[in-house]
Image: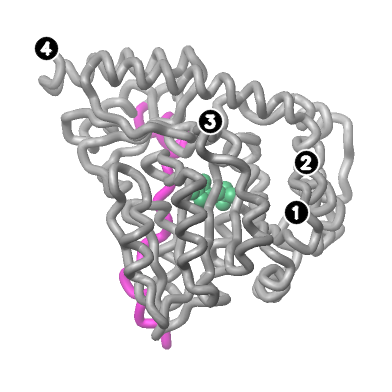
Amino acid sequence: MKWKEQINGMKAYQPGKSIDAVKREFGLDHIVKLASNENPFGSSPKVHEFLAKESFNFALYPDGYATDMRAAVAKHLGVSGDELIFGNGSDELISIITRALLHPGVNTVMGNPTFSQYAHNARIEGAEIREVPLKEGNHDLDAMLKEIDENTAIVWVCSPNNPTGVVVEDAPLKSFLKRVPKDVLVVLDEAYFEYVTNKNHKDTISYIHDYPNLIILRTFSKAYGLATFRVGYGIANKDLIAKLDPVRGPFNNTGLSQAVIQVALQDQAYIQKCREENTKGKEQIEAYCDEHDLHYYPSDTNFVLMEIKADSDVVFQKLMQRGFIIRSGNALGTPGYIRVTIGTQAQNEGLLAQLTEILKEEGVFS
Ligand SMILES: *Cc1c(COP(=O)(O)O)cnc(C)c1O
């Protein structure tokens, strides 16, 4: 068959191992998954109450324009409905954006390591990928600017960056946006926006009025604890949204998802509480790293990329045997590190206790 040449040899996305898979493989009853940056507290109890009492007609197609969810998100953000585009997770928005702008002959600029889906989608479209090494876990924006030329179509800024957790502060971000050519789309992926505590980072939404070539991506999969519902959104000026919208598939958010998002948005106290718990958990993990002289990146997310001074795959495997799923740095372009999602206090304690034993076995701790 006449496959695109670049499809040959490509692998499907390798997600964090699932709880069921690990239960089966190791015959364990109790597994803690701290691998995919899901909210360890789940979603707002209001969502569960809503799902228990409502009934739905599953035979009907959902509202393809997501009118009510759009209005609710627009109100929450203080933007207008035509400044939003919804995706089946922000993953789908990454693919919509890529499909709309990339093809053989153009290039796209991104950090390295960063979220793997930017390069993955660019490869499918046959575009040239220009990866710029991070500097101390952060995007090297000056170096990225130097990579932009007349054939650059998209530049990706993942902030806070996955897998390092480091956020781009306001001043460097603004200076970067000012200097990017107006015909290059800047994608600012803020999947972890709700977890950011850095005082030098404020809400970036107002930037869409100053920079017509900017789209901000956010999601309900992380802090909102609704990954299963697959809702992410892009925020940009309305002309940019109007160009992207025809590339979006019809009915790309389920009716159930659209309803649930509206309920979840109303419980901002829950998000606030999760943010506070997350900050405590982050301090717990950082204190462990400090105590054991393990390097980590300053995280503005619900995960920490930490050094282990041992083989990442070995530590990953041994943690899994002991009931904890994390991500090996080898899979994320950061060998010698592991990425752990910040769990509940008890989950973090359990994880760190097991890690201590493993690092003793590996001869890292005496
Ligand atoms: C998790 C994640 C996403 C994908 O989120 P979905 O909305 O669930 O598709 C996008 N970008 C980054 C940086 C992520 O970490």
The residue shown at (57%, 31%) is 39
**Earlier-in-chain disc, 4 versus 2:** 2
Residue position marked by numbered label 1 in the rendering? 254
Nearer the observer, disc 4 or disc 1? 4
Residue 228 seen in render: no
Spatial CA distance of label 2 from label 1 is 10 Å
**Earlier-in-chain disc, 4 versus 3:** 3
* Secondary structure under the numbered disc 4 in the rendered image: loop
Nearer the observer, disc 4 or disc 3? 3
Mark 1: amino acid: Thr
Name which quarter of the figure residue 322 lies in.
top left
Nearest the viewer among 122 and 161 is 161
Q: Are marks 3 and 2 in contact (CB under 8 Å)?
A: no
**Earlier-in-chain disc, 2 versus 1:** 1
Q: Which residues are magenta?
A: 1-26
In the visual, does 267 lie left or right of 232?
right
Label at residue 197? 3
The residue shown at (59%, 40%) is 202
Q: Are marks 3 and 1 in contact (CB under 8 Å)?
A: no
* Secondary structure under the numbered disc 3 in the rendered image: loop
Residue position marked by numbered label 2 in the rendering? 260
* Secondary structure under the numbered disc 2 in the rendered image: helix
Q: Position of residue 335 (x, y in %)?
A: 22, 42
Q: Residues within 10 Å of mark 2 (few under 14, many from 20)?
A: some
**Earlier-in-chain disc, 4 versus 1:** 1
Q: Residues within 10 Å of mark 3 (few under 14, many from 20)?
A: some
Q: Are marks 2 and 1 in contact (CB under 8 Å)?
A: no
Q: Which part of the image, by quadrant, shows the N terminus?
A: bottom left
**Earlier-in-chain disc, 3 versus 1:** 3
The residue shown at (55%, 33%) is 195
Mark 3: amino acid: Thr
